[in-house]
Image (cartoon, rainbow, N blue to C red):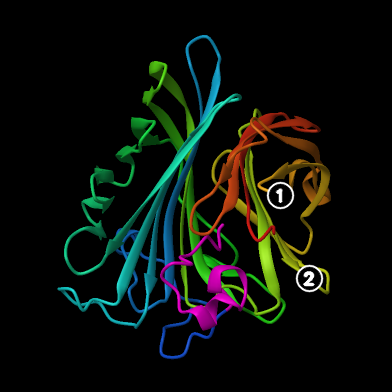
Amino acid sequence: MNARILLLLCLPAAAQAQGFAGLGGAAEGFALPERGRALSFPADHGAHPAFRIEWWYVTANLETPDGTPYGLQWTLFRSALAPRDTRGWDSPQLWLGHAAVTSAETHHYTQRLARGGIGQAGVEPAPFEAWIDDWRMAGPDFDDLTLSASGPEFSYEVTLDAQGPLVRHGEAGFSVKSAEGQASHYYSQPFFTARGTLHLPEGPVEVSGSAWFDHEWSSQPLSDRQTGWDWFSLSFESGAKLMGFQLREAEAAGYSYASWIAPDGALTPYVEAFEAEPLETVDLDGIEVPVRWAVRLPQEGVAVEVEALNAGAWNALSPPYWEGPVTVSGSHVGEGYLEMTGYE
């Protein structure tokens, strides 16, 4: 969603106690999302250094020619210690990259950390390029991109081709995250086709499939009572798509939102209508994590079971969270990705 994972290593200790990974921390001095602000492209594909938190996020459901499924993750996070962007080592912009490849049997993941202001990481809107060290998402425009990352046990190179429009979540890209009104600017490109090569310990694997891109920025996307989220991006055989999340609170019912995306990209927003109920958990590093869910959006006739391809898709990074491909069965059939944070 996403109100995504940010930077335990880079956020002040005082902020870490508020919301997940400091996302509910105070935002004094930083810009805040504005209801009614129109997103503008290609400029808004780039970075927004006046905001405290930002991420560019790709997940992909892939398979080999014989039908063996894989999942892929590529993420670039930006966190600001101050609302300015300067060159040199005094830049307050901090960067984090996460990458992973998941199969039914294995889950490989890694991360990179970088400072802003010295060229080690950044994002340029046109022509689009997002990078950290030698990891890249880049292309002549946002409809035609290449994606690459590498770690100790894997690497990949994938091409992404847009087959539909950008989707603006919430109110034209203004995405509310709590009853108190915390919000972000949030859009997706859920219509990428993907093709490329995974380099794994067992050798190179040719894959193709679909990918989902999220870009989100804010300064305080969670309230101080919210402890984490469960975020689903689901693609159905009908061509429709569903993005839904629930933000959990320790002492009260959480907040939920869903975007129903028609095959032509038309979006219908639903506030407090998305339902996700855990059906099965597994123990990962001593933490009980749901890996099978009942997901419902009654207004669109959705009543599905969402199940992890690999229950062990735990990213023991900074901070730790679960992220992996899922299968969908029930009223709608398909596949997608699930992210879960704040479980302890």
In the figure, is residue 251 to the left or right of 18? right
Whether residue 72 is visible: no
> Could you say where residue 127 lies in the image, as x and y percent from the top left?
21, 51
The quadrant where residue 249 appears: bottom right
**Element assignment for label 1:** loop
- Of residues 162 and 307, the one nearer the viewer is 307
Identify the amino acid type marked 1. Gly
Residue drawn at the location 37% of the way across and 58% of the way down: 96
- Of residues 322 and 193, the one nearer the viewer is 322
In the figure, is residue 105 to the left or right of 11? right
Where are the magenta residues, as a range? 1-24
Is 124 magenta? The answer is no
Neighbor class of circle 2 (other Cα within 10 Å; few <14, some 14-19, many 20+) is few
Neighbor class of circle 1 (other Cα within 10 Å; few <14, some 14-19, many 20+) is few
Residue drawn at the location 33% of the way across and 68% of the way down: 94
* Residue ID for mark 1: 286
> Could you say where residue 30 lies in the image, as x and y percent from the top left?
41, 85
* Residue ID for mark 2: 250
The quadrant where residue 331 appears: top right
Looking at marks 1 and 2 on the same chain, the residue that comes earlier in the sequence is marked by: 2
Identify the amino acid type marked 2. Ala
Quarter containing the C terminus: bottom right
Q: In this view, does 120 lie above or below 146?
A: below
Q: In this view, does 199 lie above or below 3?
A: above
- Of residues 135 and 55, the one nearer the viewer is 135
